[in-house]
Image (cartoon, rainbow, N blue to C red):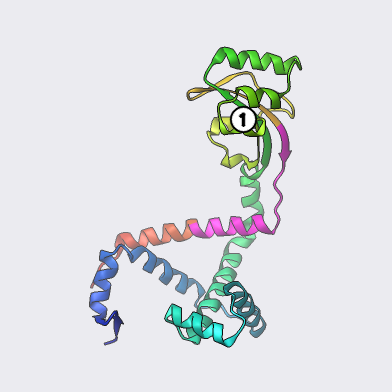
Amino acid sequence: MRSLKINGDEFQAETLVEKVVAYGMMPQLVREMTIDRCTDDISLTPEEKKTAYQQAFQQLGINTDEKLQIWLKKQGMVYVDLENRIERALKLEKFKLAKWGPKLNSAFLERKQQLDRVIYSLICTKDFCIARELYFRIKEDEQSFDELAREYSQGAEAKTGGLVGPIEIGAIYPPILAKMLLVSDLGQVQPPTKIGDWFVLVRLEKLLPATLDETIKQRLIDESFTKWLEETVSQQIETFEIA
């Protein structure tokens, strides 16, 4: 039976299993085992391996044999372990692309509104009378939004003249503010609206539509994989038992 030595102490497999459970590491173990199953049948070409090694060494800052040996020693690994880690990561990317790549267009269309970015101007105040007065000043072009935000806004946006963004619609908090921007025309100032303890004035300055570029593609694939993996792990954790 194999064992593991740490700081001079030797642990048998049974003890290690007990510690994995006690330390709350079981979800991570199941997660990694699930990834192993996903990548077992995926093959790599010699060229893919070569490129993966080069990219990994560059990311790790390894450009000499000496640095490689130092890194391996710090990680408690031998070279074949590093090779396996690099190839496993590439196989995982191929698995994700094969499983969710064909669904990218529909996933993007479903999420596009939340992925669109906006630039907007914002004034926050706890005084409704001030908010209403500022609204009319802006509507009548008596003063600029920038000037009034710097003087009256009570949030962090005061430092930027009320300007916020670019920011994804889905990342705007609270959500009601995002809804206000979605129904706004460019340059339109919304009347004072109560959000929590604040009265806000908001104006949509610019809409930056999301496109299905490589960054968004990778993000959607990663999000789909993460959701699937967490659900899979959760199901397995609920049914596991120590024999």
**Residue 105's spot in the image, x, y percent?**
67, 53
Front-lying residue, 121 or 177: 121
Q: Is residue 30 left or right of residue 85?
A: left
Q: Is residue 107 left or right of residue 225?
A: right
Residue at the (46%, 61%) spot, across then down:
229
**Does the magenta portion include 216?**
yes
> What residue span does the magenta drawing correspond to?
205-226
Front-lying residue, 117 or 44: 117
* Residue 233 to residue 51: above or below: above
Residue at the (61%, 80%) spot, across then down:
53
**Residue 19's spot in the image, x, y percent?**
26, 70
**Residue 120's spot in the image, x, y percent?**
67, 33
**Residue 17's spot in the image, x, y percent?**
27, 73
**Does the magenta portion include 222?**
yes
Among the 4 quarters of the image, the one containing residue 183: top right
Mark 1 residue element: helix
Q: Quadrant of the C terminus?
A: bottom left
Q: Quadrant of the N terminus?
A: bottom left
Q: In this figure, which residue is indicated by the disc labeled 1? A: 158
* Residue 81 to residue 113: above or below: below
Front-lying residue, 38 or 120: 120
Residue at the (24%, 70%) spot, across then down:
18
